């Protein structure tokens, strides 16, 4: 009696690359290689962060930076007292800090979101082209 052996079959995962195909390039590899595409990715991140910083500076200028103009146009604020201090001093001493803290908190959250979005784009593999 002769037993026939079944023919051997090679089983591979459908997610592995085919032999001879080029490895997929990621945006991170483009950035590491200093390619033109990598420069475009970095420039996009820098532009988004710069736009965010400019928006925060404009908001800061409009809110806190305008206080001296408000004090100049409304000199009556100095006549009103809160806790024995002129109202203008109270605004400068106490009202500015919550605004600064809120702006800083929003800036950090938005900057982290920009970086998270950038990381998401960078980590996705690109099709070779």
Image: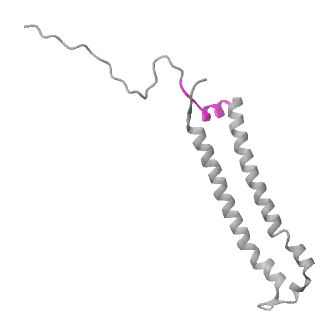
Q: Is residue 116 magenta?
A: no
What x and y, as percent, mark residue 126?
Answer: 57, 31
- For residue 32, what is the image quadrant? top right
Q: Residue at x 89, y 86 (%)?
A: 76
Q: Residue furthest top?
A: 2
Q: Residue furthest bottom?
A: 84
Tell me: 123 left or right of 111.
left
Q: Height in image: 91 above or below 59? A: below
Q: Residue at x 10, y 7 (%)?
A: 2
- For residue 18, what is the image quadrant? top left
* Quadrant location of the C terminus in the rendered image: top right
What x and y, as percent, mark residue 108?
Answer: 66, 58
Q: Residue at x 83, y 64 (%)?
A: 61
- For the rendered model, the colour scheme is one colour
What x and y, as percent, mark residue 6?
Answer: 21, 14
- Span of residues in magenta: 23-33
């Amino acid at each position: 009696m002769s037993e026939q052996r079944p023919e051997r079959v090679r089983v591979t995962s459908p997610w592995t690359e085919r032999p001879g195909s080029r490895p997929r390039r990621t945006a991170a590899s483009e950035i590491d290689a200093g390619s033109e595409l990598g420069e475009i990715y970095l420039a996009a991140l820098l532009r988004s962060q710069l736009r965010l910083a400019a928006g925060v500076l404009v908001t800061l200028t409009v809110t806190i930076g305008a206080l001296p103009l408000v004090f100049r146009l409304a000199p009556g604020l100095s006549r009103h007292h809160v806790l024995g201090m002129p109202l203008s001093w109270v605004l400068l001493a106490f009202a500015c800090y919550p605004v600064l803290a809120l702006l800083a908190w929003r800036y950090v959250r938005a900057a982290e979101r920009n970086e998270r979005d950038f990381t998401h784009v960078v980590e996705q593999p690109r099709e070779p082209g």
